[in-house]
Amino acid sequence: MGSQKRIWIARDYQKCSGCRKCEIACSLFHEKRIWPEASRVRVFMLVPGAEVPHLCVQCEDYPCVSSCSMGALSISRKTGAVLVDDEKCNACGACIEACPGRVPHLHPAKKTILICDLCDGRPQCTKVCQEGNWDALQKMTRSSWQLYKVHARTPEEITRELVRGLYGEFGKEYI
Amino acid sequence: MRGYAGKFLDIDLSREKIQEVGFDENVLQSYIGGRGLAAKILWNRLGERWETVDPFAPENVLTVLTGPLTGFFPGGRVCVSGKSPQSNGMVGSTVGGEFGIDLKCAGYDGLIITGRAPKPSYITIFENEVSIKDASPIWGKDGKHTLKILTQESRRELKANFPEYGELKEPSVLYIGPAGENQTRIASVMAKWTHASGYGGYGGVMGSKNLKAVVAKGLGPLPEVEDIEKVSELIKIADKECYKSGSFRMWGTGAAGYNCGAKTSSEPVRNWQEEWHDNKGFAVDKFEERLWVKRYWADYGCPTSCLKIATPKMGEFKGAITDNPDYEMQAFLGPNLGIFTPEDNVYLASLIDDLGLCGIQAGNTLGFIAELYQRKIVNEGDLDGIQLEWGNAKAFGEIAQKIAKREGIGNTLAEGAYRAALELGKIKGMNLAALAVVEKGMAIGAHGIRSGRDFASNISYACNVQAGDHTSTAAIPSGNENSELNDILHDSGVYCNFNTFSVSLDLLWEFFDAVTGWKTLRQDWYETNGFRILNLQRAMLLLGGPDLTWKANADDENPARFYEPLPSGPYKGKEVDRKSFEESKQEYYEAVGWDKNGLPKPENLRRLGLQDVETKLRKAQVLTA
């Protein structure tokens, strides 16, 4: 790991409006198309009001990288992001199973996996979120004492907590 | 063709026949999509026998259409249409959300649904895999449970269909509640929990087709556009402009529940008996401080987020959830029912959503029956034992449930205020139609015209091809591109008209240009295409039937109440002036190519290439000269 300051995309789900501009920005940047399922950040709405921007947290131990038998995943020395080598990836899905948040997903049209690459340090999703003053996704400096892996949760897990927070005891009915 | 997926699904539910159809480029160029294309489809398929088509019969055509700008211009919507069981014409009725995006990503621009499924059914569109499924287990369920079950069920199925993919985002769902299932005329097609395509009454049309829901999930990108760099740049500019719309962003339209009462005096109060109130207890700060759990809630690509989420945290209505409520729901389920308590209002809005009723139509119908109760025209006995005092949210809730189930008095009220007035009038031997504040069978928006301080004018509703719709109203085309032709454009390009308030018309047309690449679109729209859609809608509205038919001119009339002076408030004494109304009406007729009796002029129909409309109107003796 390099000693330079690394970034982390903080997520404040309660502030997410569900405008999905992060998806639009991400897919325009990476795919030159507006393509919700090919976006590296995807907003799940399993219960209305509980919008969950779902993206890689860069776990400290990178279980996805170690799960890859093809050597397709590596860690960016610069940003700490998981980088995908499309040539090597055979879309086997081992990294999806290894990820505690089931964050990686296959590209809908290419035989490769999609994982947030932090746009090489200048994330488009946080930029567009900041432009709207939503602050649901914020670019922050990674702290050495914080354990980021705890944030790697499935959309269902996050939704369950969020709905309780939003709607209290009545929320249970809709999960 | 750019901006379009290029395919539409034509689904005959009676024969379970699903096929892909397309439209020629010149048809799409002329009618664009959404409301415009719906007018074309409906006219082609039903025009010849329009006046005989029962909106709830299998032969009615239900369209769910996107437009080329859906997903590109900020604020995703989809446009629902068909022969309306309210106006008996055709209404373009849009609803927000991601459904249109999912549909386009699945490769379809829209759905054309006919027939009637032999049993309760729902349609799933998972990429190009389209199926009709059994909806028996969810038939009768309220909105929130319907959405929950369909979301979970569909996610399971998607996981089975695409096992290697990982987590797929949930599909988008359009559905109906019990009010739609039971074919009330005042039911919405719903999305999410609170989003509704209300005007027109297409929830009941879906119900008549035994269609509980349509679930769509696309994995692909939005269609290719002419210039993606330009589109991306335009999105940035539009966003920036919309972010400046401070008050909409902050309060949505919910601040109007007080403002339209206190300031513009144009809010329905107790079935429009008044249009003024100064109840600060109903002001938006009470909603935001006590009830909102989410201040910014948006649909696909929307920078404005006029939606907010409200839920009472204590008291008897604890656990009710709705948006804002937005102004229409605030007004119609608030002051219009003599309700000035935010919690009561949120309770009713949540209930109306769950039942799949339209907040405007239902609120108007409830106000109408409550006025009959106030005037002792109906009593507790007529209302199945319910004491319908103004302000009694629970009593209004009970009536709403009866409407959704078509139970007791609810069966009469399920017809909407106007038809209920005709029926109750017969029973009571009185003319009650004057107490139904409606336009051609439809409740109007909560923007009164007597004070002259709101945006609606004396002809907004009276001459509207969309009848009571306040989001697209009759306005004299002044030749400078500033008229209802723009409303038709938004409903046809299918994006949120609210996000157009902040951007220039030039920017909007640049969007059309960058998405479609069609160069003459703008000029053609204001010269012919917009007018063609307007005239098609007018023709269908005048053909009407089978239960009610409107006469041009004679029925291009404001609700009787608007000719009564405002009894209170800063504009006390003001009413619609008949003489200036008639003048505005004539000016409007002239501007849109209708004669002094409000009938489309044959030469104008010919100019627009609508010879078949002329022939039909003559055959039906709408045109006689």
Image: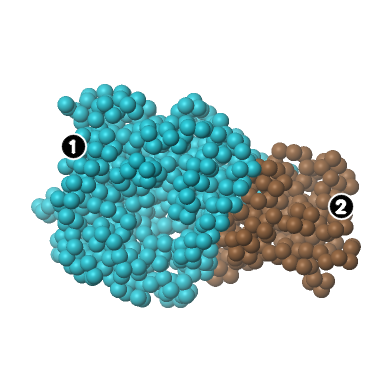
| Residue B228 on image: x %, y % | 63, 41
What colour do you see for chain B?
cyan
Q: Residue at x 47, y 26 (%)?
A: B26
Query: How many marks overall?
Result: 2
Q: Nearer the viewer, residue B372 or B226?
A: B226
Is residue A93 something one can see in this rendering?
Answer: yes
| Residue B607 on image: x %, y % | 32, 26
Q: Which residue is mark 1?
A: B596
Asked where in the image residue B222 lies, by quadrant, the reply is top right
**Does residue B297 appear to the left or right of B589 in the view shown?**
right
Residue A75 lies, with reference to residue B2, above or below; the image says below
Q: Residue at x 35, y 68 (%)?
A: B259
Residue B238 lies, with reference to residue B550, above or below; the image says below
User: Looking at the rendering, in which quadrant would you find the C terminus of chain B?
Assistant: top left
- At label 2, counting other C-alpha atoms closer than 10 Å, the crowd grade (few under 14, some 14-19, many 20 or more) is some
What is the chain letter for disc 1? B
Residue B49 lies, with reference to residue B188, above or below; the image says above
| Residue B509 on image: x %, y % | 49, 42
Asked where in the image residue B337 lies, by quadrant, the reply is bottom left
Which chain did the image draw in brown? A
Q: Residue at x 25, y 27 (%)?
A: B602
Q: Which residue is mark 2?
A: A74
Mark 1: which amino acid?
A: Lys
